[in-house]
Amino acid sequence: MESTIMKKERKGLVLFSEYKRGEGIRKALEVGRENILFELKSSKLKGRGGAGFPTATKWMLTAAAISEEKFLVCNADEGEPGTFKDRVLLMEYPELVFDGMVIGGYTIGAKEGIVYLRGEYEYMLKSLEDYLEQMRKDNLLGNKILGKKDFNFDIKIRLGAGAYVCGEETALIESLEGCRGESRNRPPYPVNTGYNNRPTSVNNVETLASVPHIVLKGGDWYMKVGTDKSSGSKLFSVSGDCNKPGVYEMPWGTSIRELLKVVEAENTKAVQVGGASGICIPESQFDRKLGYEDAATGGSIMIFNKNRDMLHILKNFMEFFVEESCGQCTPCRIGNVKLLEGVEMMEKGEFTFDYIEKLKDLGSTMQVASKCGLGQSSPNSFITILDNFKDEILNKRGNGAA
Amino acid sequence: MKKDKTSRTPVSQQPFEVEKPTDTNTIGGTVSIEINGEKMHVPLGTTILEACKEKKVHIPTLCHHEDLCVAGVCRVCVVEVEGFKTLQAACAFPITSPIKIKTSTPLVRKARRYVIDLLLSEHYGECYSCIRNQNCELQDLAHEYGVDGYTFGHVSKPTYEKDTSSYSVIRDMSKCILCKRCVRTCIDLQEVGVLEAIDRGDKTHISTFMEKPLADVICINCGQCINRCPTAALHANDPSDEIWEAIDNPKKHVVIQTAPSPRAAIGECFGLEAGHSMTMELNTALKRIGFDGVFDTNFTADLTIFEEGTELIIRLKKALVDKDASVKLPQFTSCSPGWVKYIEHFYPEYLDNLSTAKSPQQMFGAIFKTFYAQQKGIDPKDIVSVAVMPCSAKKFECNRPEMNSSGYKDVDYGLTTRELAKMIKEAGIFLPEMPKSHFDSPFGDASGAGLIFGATGGVMEAALRSVIEFVTGNKTEDIFANANILPLRGFEGVKYVELPIANVGPVPEILKHLVPSWDFLKGATLKVAVAHGTANAKKIMEDIKAGGKFSECHFIEFMACPGGCIGGGGQPIPTTPEIRKKRAEAIYGEDSSLEMRKSHENPHVIKIYEDFFKEGPCGHLSHKLLHTHYTKRGKFIA
């Protein structure tokens, strides 16, 4: 069974460390819900999708919600440009992800887990289904898992249809329900009324994959890795101008400079942390640390060397958002178009500094006025690239103040 | 928390509905909040918008509409809530914990202004050439927020081609601001589902199935989307230019019929509060504009009661006396053209239940070009018949190919309340100042029964006022005080009334040739129901399909629009539950002020049966001119 899943030799402190399928589930069922939540809470594990919401809190809220039916959803819609770590976890470490889901289902009281798999990952559907089938045979899924009375849990996989916004948890739920992928108003939150109006915990692949290790080895052990505000380790999907692109597990708190060294990047001008919706960091700030408290990321690290044109990069990002906004709220739908138009003006050298400042101001308004995380984060690269590479972009082009 | 689990909208996105605790000190019943530093208590689940409204703090809105579920997409109502990093949409934020709200900080004002600027940048509109000029929510907001230029540019050319395929509704998507009120109206309020957002990002737009023209999809023409569109992206297909042309043509004899609902609402177009009926003033205005005859649609509403009532009696007799299994009951009303198209699309297998009687509008049209033409000695080809209706579907109805049994189009133009108001203004007339005058002969003034057709339950009430007297020989007043059949009134979505027939009287002369005696109804219980809005119609239809209690009804009134005709798609904008209530009150008030309040007492109707439809209701000629047939359309689009 596992032969269909290619396993590379990877090394890491947590996720890429030794783990035997089912171990986490066994321990979890042994210690019970309260202890799982206690360990999770002391581990300070935060959501790995990028938003960084404390996982223990999310599970506690879902567990506390009163309902005859609850759901655990694994967000595998990995759509942020430059991330591919969930793909590695699903293909090479499915035992971590699925065991994490079973533990989550047990903790919150769900009978059903749903993997929302990115449409482009359809190729792994078969092997994942086979893997789940094997888990059923081994009593790691289905009724009375590992003999535990009253614990029935199964997992199904649903494919996305390619919309970036469906990585946002409420849009993901809309999509699961068969609707157009559009984010919902919050509050109320999915932990109370989520999938099919039932309490639902939506967790990132990597978050779930961290859970079995925490359950096995304890929250304190996990806290030893990383920083105080960003505990544990993180998978970084590194791409761009470096000799060793790929997925790396590193403790939170690693500085950008350290990371660049590991992946053998030279002549680096800028690092985009957090994908298209992330921030762009110039060389002068390479000592900044990766973590929720400083340079946060869902995993995407894009490296640009000194031959790259920052405006071109920005244009690429903005074109992405213009297309990928779900189109429901005004700031995101039209705001991104205006930012892209601004980039095109700068490209042609036909702009005024006043107008560019106005657009930055618009960007900061979009950050607070948009309906969901997409529109709230889409101006990040516009603002940080213009802030950090002002000379390159504005002063070199045209006459500047045309 | 009352939530509709059958709705398409996720429960989490439906507004909280919490009963206000009578004792505000109840623990947990209310939440203490602060709006701009002022403390107040609100019931749990109140939205920030509602709380602000109570505190007289004005919050601008665009995508919010009282009739619709929450959207929270335009973002113009954003406010600051302490503890939140981002601004929150006031319309979509249910208050469940003590929060502090600020509604007019620099950040809030800037965000609102930018949202308006962004919308204006993509909204193709030169206000002075716009059908919604001075009645546009976007224009109002731009004014309110002091927009004095286009910060982020402005489109100078239309971005989409207009869809003018429909007789009723025109879609001008270049003016659409994607508030999705039309989408929510169509699918949530009406449960038709013609409109939806398609594509995404900057290409997002509202469209139909496979982007087909509106005339080719299952649109029922109810025009509820028009009533809720904040801009002119949706508007009715306006025939006023053609009507002016006919008026100005001396060879044409232009007659106009006015329905009760436009009369109860047109004052709103002239700045009056909702709830002023302007029937008599309107008569004068129309004569001054140059119409050659001004008539009351209620005359044919009274006629409808005869025709539809007789049809019901025939059905009942066939079913109960002749035991004819092919007779379809309950009989459905057929005067709402939106409902007719709805049933043609969604329940074509029930078309035989639909009364074959034409709507009052079409009956009058047929009479103008036959009886009226004879009386006046005018060649029917020179008569142009116009109908002022609260309705956009009436435009489609008058263009149905089968509506020409006289050899001419029954009704040439259907005009909405809004369009008529515009014509009156164009003629230099300020309606509220007009002296009063009566309708023209030979049809004269009609009964109050015809009048109340305009409100949901009205057709049924009008029918019962006559049926009770025909069958029992007693007065309606003996059962219902002042002949006001209150159980049929009000805005409850579905109403159901049972009426036991204890004793029967003699059969009136006009019906004797059809039913020799009422004995078959003695001891029976007449069961009737009323639904308004097609979402409620659907509830009844599904119940009938499942063999529920409504399948045992004898007669059911269906109106496509919420509130009935007074909430029609041709009525003045805006529309809210409150406005519809006032319009209904105006209609019921007018009814109770009349002497003649029952259709069968209308002497003009009795006379037309004596002089013209000599075989009586449902006779040969009335079948030819006053009845119609329907088309099985189905839901699937070729």
Image (spheres, rainbow, N blue to C red):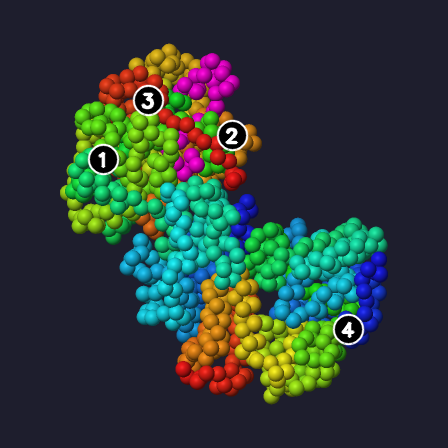
Binning the other alpha carbons within 10 Å of mark 4 as few (below 14), some (14 to 19) or many (20 upward) gives: many
Where residue B500 appears, x then y in whole percent? 43, 23
Q: Is residue B386 left or right of residue B170?
A: left
CB atoms of marks 2 and 4 within 8 Å? no
Front of the two marks 4 and 3: 3
Which amino acid lies under the numbered mark 4 shown in the image of this protein? Answer: Val
Does residue A179 appear anywhere in the picture? yes
Q: Residue at x 18, y 35 (%)?
A: B251
Residue marked by disc 1: B255
Q: Is residue B438 left or right of residue A4?
A: left
Magenta part of the chain? B313-341
Looking at the picture, does residue A164 appear above or below residue A297?
A: above
**Towards the viewer: B483 or A372:** A372
Q: Is residue B615 left or right of residue B352?
A: left
**Towards the viewer: B19 or A213:** A213
Where residue B591 appears, x then y in whole percent? 27, 35
Binning the other alpha carbons within 10 Å of mark 2 as few (below 14), some (14 to 19) or many (20 upward) gives: few
Residue marked by disc 4: A14
Distance from disc 4 to disc 3, alpha carbons, whole Å, reads 86 Å
Looking at the picture, does residue B620 appear above or below residue B203?
A: above
